[in-house]
Amino acid sequence: MKKLLAKELREYWNIFRLSKQHIYLPESSLIGGKESTAMFTIAGMQQLIPYLSWKEHPLGKRLFNIQKCIRTVDIDEVGDASHCTFFEMMGNWSLGSYFKKEAVQRSREFLVDVLEFDPKKLAVTVFEGDEAAPRDNETAWYRKEIGMTDDKITYMPADNNRRSPGPVGPCGPDTEIFYRVGKTEFPSKDSNPQSDEDNWLEIRNNVFMEFYRDDTWTLTKLKNQNVDTWMGFERMLKVLQQKETVFDTDAFFPLITLIETTLGIAYKGNERRCRIIADHIRTSFFLIHNGIIPSNEGRGYVLRRLIRRMYYNFMLLKSVPEEVFDTFVWHIVKIVDDTFWEHADTKMIVTTLLKEAHQFQKTIAHGQKLLDELINAAKKKTILGKDIFKLYDTFGFPLELTKEILEEKWCTLDIKWFEQEMEAQQQRSRAWSKDMFKQGIDWANYVQGIPQTLFVWYEVLEKDGIKLLKDFEVQGQRVLIFDKTPFYAESWGQIWDRWTLILDDWTKIEVIQVQKYNGIFLHFVR
């Protein structure tokens, strides 16, 4: 196997796809369009959904790129060995040019012939079939034609081996390629991704978009038989460089090294905080570069949370003077810019980062003073949850930071009380929204020109193509209006649905109440 640096892997990918008559597809913006409920681009194929269905692409039938993506659903998990908020996706597509046979051949060619993967360490999965679509014996046959043995071909159900960008739209079976990461060099004959999951790492995926699924879940054959292929860039680097995690590769190494030298600490033993800082800096860089500024709503809130989480993890590693942190930010932004050849306005990015961090530092200083008072006054060294909730809710003091300080002071937190206070606050918010709806507000001023909402009932709890028609505030309460909704609005004495709204990029928004005005559903959200 070749041991490639990030720059080299990009070159190999570009040369290989160009040799197969693919045209470079310019990356789409990280920021979702106005017509989409998606906050961010979460996959390389996101911009190609219309072309995977029926539309002809102006660049042709064979495309490829490496797409920058952001996913924030797992933001609290960042710091472990695998989660990132910013990552890159290597993709290539056939829009009716070639199908299963060539896709299977080219996938193996790039891995085995170009990157020199040992074929004895590879295994695949294919779709086992169900009542809606047949077993994918064709793909399994093509796998065997290029040398894959029966014991390394596993048939898997639709939950594992059928893909689509949404409940409605193009879809089809997929075949996934796995690499052996177990303790033994080669897998045993009975080891495969189904029976021995922990010892196999998925490295490549080919989705065969041959069907269109409508809102009744009926599948019909598409005119064009399309291929959507992806590989995770950072994951591929992890394998090629034979590292334990993506954070140990050269994609992150310069950032981790700067953290070590700035703070005079070792990465080993401080992995979690170093990973959070490195990941969040990269993501914040690209959000600011794409025109986002910190705020309390939407994308701006995501950015604010990333910067603040980065900052207090930096300070928890080691408290340093403000000028040391400022210098660190200047240097790390320059590293990110040089790594990705963005030629960004680094001065503007640094200014935005430091402004938010300095403002948050004031919040922390004030919260620290209040927390010290609570610690000094605490009996039995237990801090009441309702007091910690006040720090969290009123002053924006992070719960994680509170826990860290309490551990250092040998204090404990009554987390049950905190959770009760959190739930009580949510209940108050719901009640306030309900009362506000009854205050005689002239909603006609807010919904003028908006059509009635289509209620899609509960058998369709996910709905592709739902459009956000309006996002506004009334007396500090945020209200969303969509063209369709599965949320029941309060009526006839039945309470509204209290579910979570998950957007295309997996951003979660709590729906605290749903009311109906002249057929228009008003979603009151947190």
Image: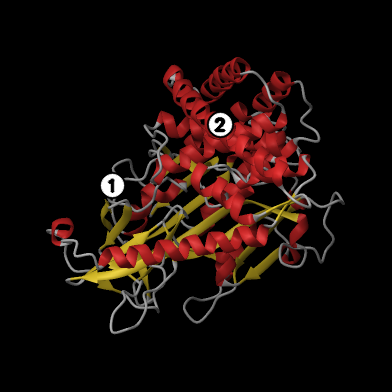
Look at the numbered disc 1 and give the secondary structure of its residue: loop
Q: Which is nearer the eye, 296 or 35?
A: 296
Q: Position of residue 462 (x, y in %)?
A: 41, 68
In this view, 95 is above or below 270:
below
- Are dots 1 and 2 in contact, CB under 8 Å? no
Q: Nearer the viewer, residue 390 or 260?
A: 390
Q: Amino acid at mark 2?
A: Ile
Please identify the quadrant where the C terminus is shown: bottom left
Going by the image, does 120 lie left or right of 332?
right
Counting from the top left corner in percent of width and height, residue 256 is at 69, 28
Left or right for 439, reference 135:
left
The residue lying at 50 percent from left, 58 percent from top is: 207
Residue 24 image-quadrant placement: top left
The residue that appears at 78% across and 56% down in the rendered structure is 199
Residue type, label 1 = Lys
Q: Nearer the viewer, residue 32 or 132?
A: 32
Residue 397 is at least partly visible in this image: yes
Q: Residue furthest right?
A: 184
Does residue 349 sit above or below 225 in this rendering?
above
Q: Which mark is residue 34?
A: 1
At label 2, counting other C-alpha atoms closer than 10 Å, the crowd grade (few under 14, some 14-19, many 20 or more) is many
- Chain-order first, disc 1 or disc 2: 1
Farthest residue in the bottom direction? 492
- Please tell me whether mark 2 sits on a helix, a strand or a loop: helix
Q: Quadrant of residue 430?
A: bottom left
Left or right of 130 in this view: 56: left
**Disc 1 residue crowd, few under 14, some 14–19, many 20+, Cα 10 Å:** few
Q: Quickly name the residue at label 2.
A: 281
Residue at the (17%, 59%) spot, across then down: 447
Quadrant of the image containing the N terminus:
top right
